[in-house]
Image (tube, rainbow, N blue to C red):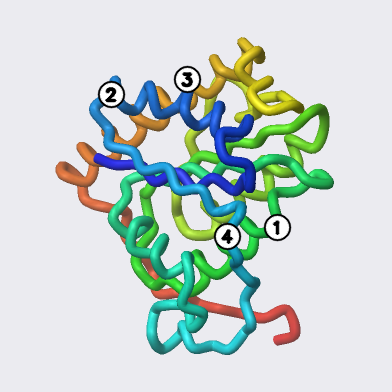
Amino acid sequence: MNVLIINGSPRADGNTTVAVQEMQKIFAAEGIACEHVQIGSKIIRGCIACGSCSKTGRCAIDDEVNVLAKKFEAADGLVLASPVYYASANATLVACLDRLFYSTHFDKTMKVGASVVVARRGGCSATFDELNKYFTICGMPVASSQYWNSIHGNAKGEAAQDAEGLQTMRTLARNMSFLMKSIALGREKFGLPEKEQWQPTHFIR
């Protein structure tokens, strides 16, 4: 089993990295492979609404998003981690995720998702909700912890002093590991839930 971690922070080895590294220790102990990709400092523009991906299954802007798409397709779980900017996720991460989720056509059902947010003080809950919406629109179960998946720190490395936040990360990784393993067993025995054909409607008709 494997997990892909997408880190939206532009700061290498910052507080967002402290949080996901705490999770990585647990994934390793659980025998789950993990890849940590930091995209916050990369140049990733938003969707240009060209519609090309509806035909090709990949984004027309050939950058980190198409690289991540292959990793995401192969992963059993996805962790989205971001610092909080104005009660929102890093804009580069949001641009990346909008295109990643919209342009890819592979079945995301039952891949386990978890979001992690890091702030000096406030805005964690809003950012946490924002990131979870990527999972819940495409049939991905959301892993939970003992508290909302947040950790606090301002200066580089301060998150390592947040004992409860670190425990929340460890509990999240354990719960996520259990959920991925349970889903794998359920898929073997029962298969995936039946899917109905999508019936798109609009509010104007």
Instruction: Using the image as rendered, state which of residue 122 and residue 112 is in the foreground.
Output: 122
Residue 135 x, y percent position in the rendering = 52, 52
Find disc 1 in the rendering and name its residue. 91
Identify whether 28 is placed above or below 129: above
Question: To which residue does mark 2 refer?
Answer: 30
Q: Nearer the viewer, mark 2 or mark 4?
A: 4
Q: Which residue is at 39% across, 46% downward? A: 4
| Mark 4 or mark 3, earlier in chain | 4
Which amino acid, mark 1? Answer: Ala
Q: How far apart are the two marked residues, 2 and 4, measured between alpha carbons?
A: 31 Å
Q: Tell me how far mark 1 sits from mark 3, CA to CA.
A: 27 Å
What residue is disc 3 on?
A: 170
Q: Amino acid at mark 4?
A: Lys
- Residue type, label 2: Glu
- Residue toward you, 199 or 166: 166
Q: Amino acid at mark 3?
A: Arg
